Image (cartoon, coloured by chain):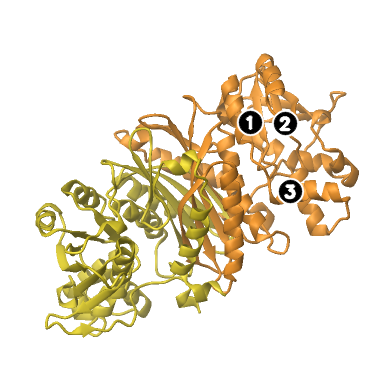
Chain colours: A orange, B yellow
Amino acid sequence: MKVSELGEFGLIELLANIINNARDPKSKAWKRVLVGTGDDTAAWQDDGSVQLATTDSLVQDTHFDLALTTWEDLGWKALAVNLSDIAAMGGIAEYALVSLTLPSELDTECVVKLCRGMVDIAGKFDVAIVGGNIAASEKVNITVSLMGSLQGKIPLLRSAAIPGDLIAISGYTGLSAAGLLMLKQKRKVDDESARLLTEAHLRPVPRIEQGQRLLKLGVKAAIDISDGLIADLEHVCKASHAGATINKDLLPIHPALKQYFPSEYESLAMAGGEDYELLFTAPQKIMEQAKKSLECPVTVIGEINEGNEGKVTVVDSSGRIHELKKSGWEHFESMT
Amino acid sequence: MKVSELGEFGLIELLANIINNARDPKSKAWKRVLVGTGDDTAAWQDDGSVQLATTDSLVQDTHFDLALTTWEDLGWKALAVNLSDIAAMGGIAEYALVSLTLPSELDTECVVKLCRGMVDIAGKFDVAIVGGNIAASEKVNITVSLMGSLQGKIPLLRSAAIPGDLIAISGYTGLSAAGLLMLKQKRKVDDESARLLTEAHLRPVPRIEQGQRLLKLGVKAAIDISDGLIADLEHVCKASHAGATINKDLLPIHPALKQYFPSEYESLAMAGGEDYELLFTAPQKIMEQAKKSLECPVTVIGEINEGNEGKVTVVDSSGRIHELKKSGWEHFESMT
């Protein structure tokens, strides 16, 4: 079977099974693991605090088109997508390693700009870039590994949603995918909207502080919606052995999205991906505190249900069920 | 200037300067950093112990040819090269993240075999593979990040060699590059030598235990000779602001190398690269203990000198200076 037939998530599950089945029960390293493959970051119990680590790659012509991004923005985003995974656990980001593969014909000035973009966001979130690796390749590949820690004993988890929990997301959804469409199709939008959409796609701001605040408030379940709102909510439902219902009329859609993408904004918001907002679930009381406490919009869009394990039902305000064509971004799918 | 003109090590230095110049003196993360860019791994002081982290990539058609390796061996090697970096610090390897980029047409069975090879070596060195990432790309890229810790306060460093220290290496040198030549050129060698050379190239065994033992014995300076013996000794000399003299007639050359590569064995041993042996320096007394204590050959090949900063002088037993054509492996160089 080809990788494209099994798909990204099928392949991850297959490999995770091989890894977990081979675990030596006497292993000192495995004994300390709190979260292995299958959440936004790994987590283990250190002598002192809980440690977090995650890795994510940006691959030329898969994740980015050099005609549509600056090198500074690319450096920013390569670290931002990893920061977002730490945010989804409620963690503190600390140390980064950067592995670059580059064509030998590339101008060094491009790599300098890439590095400056990374240093820029690293400074803003107090991350020390402590090492890395450079190798030759035909196309650019930027793989960042980010390590951090937790103030608390248990991170925000995909598997901790409970039936009855409300489901909320931070900020707006669909802006990044709309930004990509705008850049690719050279759509004309007003300057302010252009800036908003471009930044959402090329220079996302991870919700690090918000994740930490959610953890402190007692929220248990979260994920970042990098794969797309519905796809990531499905990940939460699957990991939590529950279902979810969301009301598409409650989705936080930015006015610019409605104005310039009138026929597409709903699908962009539900399945666009790369928003790097947090989706989290909590009982109503904690949700009220989160709304007051987070310095960004917090919008309740639905509820976790018993049964229908791993399934997300989308309804509108009249209660009518909405059929989904696509729940989110899946690697390999787009390339076949 | 093109990346190929500046070269791998020039580019690393350039980026390290940008990163270090942007360090915020109030940063909590940077305050704890003991070793940043420029050694085999990064190191920082945690609440308890010293933490280590490293990353290394294997890139299709740069580091490996799918016609010459099995997928199991590729998985083994991707983790082994990172383990070797932890070994060079005297560290304990603990947690790994694996970032794969794969062509969508690839058979999943190949990825399963790759994973089995990784799980195999992970089990042998008690490493927990705790997460990763999979994305689509035209060619295979395997980037592993490996985290670990230290029993002790200061790791083995490239920068800790002192004039008067003897220079030694573990095991044999040149076997991996000879293995690659044998495989590429389909050279006929006896079965035992074929196994030795193939394993040296495709399935290297990192010197984890040896690194830890050296640290305990009081050795201060080490590096793994992945870039080539002379190139890596130059890295030690540069970081330690010293020079070095080695006697090429003392190099530990395996009989099989002399037998099958009679005109090439010296250059393979000095500049072949990918040996994953440890080069270390220490005063004579500690060196004697290392020879007795390590469960592998330990060969003294020269001495650290004052002056000639960053320079390695190669002599023969008659004292005649030997001019080097190439000191080791350098990315980009081979592609121009």
Which residue is identified by label 2? Answer: A296
> Is residue B16 at all visible to an observer of this figure?
yes
Q: Is mark 3 on a helix, strand or loop?
A: helix
Q: Is mark 1 on a helix, strand or loop?
A: helix
Front residue of B2/B96: it is B2
- Which three-letter amino acid code belongs to the residue tagged 2? Cys
Q: Where is residue A159 in the image (x, y as percent from the top left)?
A: 56, 28
Check disc 1 and give the amino acid type: Gln
Residue at 57% over, 52% down: A119
* Residue where numbered disc 1 is placed: A210
Q: Residues within 10 Å of mark 2 (few under 14, many from 20)?
A: some
Q: Who is closer to the viewer here, B96 or B118?
A: B96
- Asked if the residue at tag 2 contacts the one at tag 1, i.e. Cβ–Cβ closer than 8 Å, the answer is yes
User: Label 1: chain?
Assistant: A
| Cα distance in 3D space between marks 1 and 2 | 8 Å
The picture quadrant where one finds residue A27 is top left
Q: Name the residue under label 3.
A: A199
Q: Quadrant of the N terminus of chain A?
A: bottom right
Q: Which residue is drawn at 70% across and 51% down?
A: A202
Q: What residue type is labelled 3?
A: Glu
Residue B93 screen position, x and y as percent: 33, 45
Q: Which of marks 3 and 1 is nearer the N terminus?
A: 3
Task: Give the mark nearer the N terminus: 3 vs 2.
Answer: 3
Q: Which of B317 and A39 is in front in this view?
A: B317
Residue located 40% across and 69% down the image: B68
User: Residue A256, relative to residue B262: is it above or below?
Assistant: above
A75 lies left or right of B245: right
Q: Residue furthest top?
A: A285
Give how far across and how far down residue B162 sits, in percent.
Answer: 22, 60
Q: Earlier in the sequence, mark 1 or mark 2?
A: 1
